[in-house]
Structure formats: C-alpha cells, structure tokens
Image (cartoon, rainbow, N blue to C red):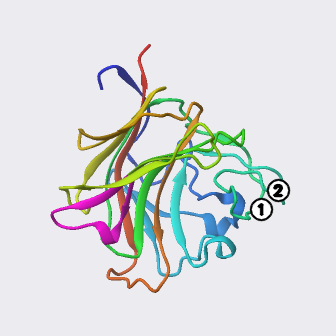
Amino acid sequence: MDGYELEFEDTFDGDRLDGSRWVPRYLPQWTTGDASAARHRVGDGRLDLLIEADQPPWCPELEGALRVSSLQTGVFAGPLGSTIGQHGRGSGAVVREPQRDVRLYTPRYGLIEMRARTTDDPRCMAALWMIGYEDEPERSAEICVCEIFGRDVGRDATRVGMGVHPFGDPSITDDFTQVTLPIDARDFHVYAVEWTPDRVSFSVDGRHVRTVNQSPAYPMQLMLGIYEFPEPVASVRPYPKRFTVDYVRGYRRIG
C-alpha cells in the first residue's frame, strides 16, 4: 500500500479468535455478558459472524428483539449505573456491567480495509464501522466503512451505505449515503476507507466511491458485526445467518 505501512492485520488463521485483536462482544456495558457475546466461528482462514436461532436479543430494554454478533477493538465505560460509555448517547442506556477499559486497536487516521461477503436475508445487516473511543464525550463520531442490508443485495447490484455521523461531536456534520454499486455482496469484495486529517475517502474493490471533506480528529476503534432485526420483515434464509470475513487490515501513513 503506497505511502502506508501495515499496523493491524487479522487473516483469521487457526481455529479461534485472537483476543489480542478483538473483544468478542457488542457494547457490553449496556447489557449482560450472554446477550452481548458474539456468536462466531474461525476456521480455514475465515471468520464467520453468526446469528443463530437460539441467540438472545442484545438489549431488549433499548433495542427490542434486535440480535447482534459483533467484534470491537476497544471498550470504554463508566461505573455501574452511570450513563458514561461508548455509543449510548441519548438512548437512556445505563451501565449494567462494569467494564475494564481496553484499547486493542484505536488508530488516529490511516487506511482500513476488509474483504468480506454477506447475506441477502432482508432481516439482516452487516457492517464495518469505526467509533470514537469516547474517553471524552465529544470524541464520539462514527465512520461507516460499509453498511449492507440484506434487502439491498442483488445479483447485479448492491446498495452500500458509507459516510460519517456526528453523534456527540460538534465538529462533524452528518454526511452518510447509500451508493448503488455493480456488485453482488454475497461474493467477496474489499471495502476500505482512507482517513486523513482533512477527509475520509471510501472505496470498494480498489475503486474510489466517494469522499467526505471532514474528519474526526481522535482515536477510533473498529466495530465489525452482523445484525438481525425483528419482525414484521420476513426471513428468507435459514439459521445461522452469516457474515464471512476473509481479512481486516489497518495501515498507518509512513512518516
């Protein structure tokens, strides 16, 4: 990668998830350990994030019957009963299980890429996104590298969401869109973002798609997951629902 050097990589070799790279839970401070745990399998050089038939909802009080299997590269939360924690702003969430602060990979700027395939089940969505570590409340914006709903996946075209959300960051203006691309997301494709002090540029399979001319200026962590939304949307695929990742890489700019 011209101008960059590799600083984070997981090619999912072996038969178990690397705990030095990933926390296998989704925003664990707001719910219980069992409900936040990611259902997953690692083997043959790939990660499968799964939604299984017996999987409990992530947090019924906040999100109803939503089910999630997600990994993240950091955790920050306040004490039991507080409202301090990542991605909880305005939701009414309180810390139900105290967490140890974790920073496995929290870059400030760089290039992030993932090679993956997902499902066309209309109840599911798969995504790679980044959120501010949020050790200060304003450090809370999101960079969405890719967000793919199963209902938007087709043989000849797929709508891919990408952009930035401010949440509690007053320096960021919401700039998110869905772009229709001539790909079938049930096949493997490479989704990437180049994040600099001035802009955030998005690409798919090495081709530039769009650029946002603003940029969060603080460390962010990776969030990698599959989500299943509740009825009334009909499910058209058997369990487990699957998001398969070939690799995730992070690069820092040289010099």
| View extreme (left): residue | 156
Quadrant of residue 15 within the rendered picture: bottom left
Is residue 242 shown above or below 206? below
What amino acid type is highlighted by mark number 1? Val
**Distance in Å between CA atoms under marks 2 and 1:** 5 Å
Question: Is 149 in front, or is 212?
Answer: 212
Q: Where, quadrant-wise, is the C terminus in this rendering?
A: top left
The spot of residue 33 in percent (x, y) is 68, 65
Q: Is residue 112 magenta?
A: no
The spot of residue 13 in percent (x, y) is 38, 47
Write down the residue under mark 2: 82
Write down the residue under mark 1: 94
Badge 2 marks a residue whose secondary structure is: loop
Crowdedness of circle 2 by 10 Å Cα count: few (<14), some, many (20+)?
Answer: some
Q: Which mark is residue 166?
A: none
Do tag 2 and tag 1 residues touch (Cβ < 8 Å)?
yes
The spot of residue 207 in percent (x, y) is 22, 39
> From which residue to which does the magenta span run?
146-161
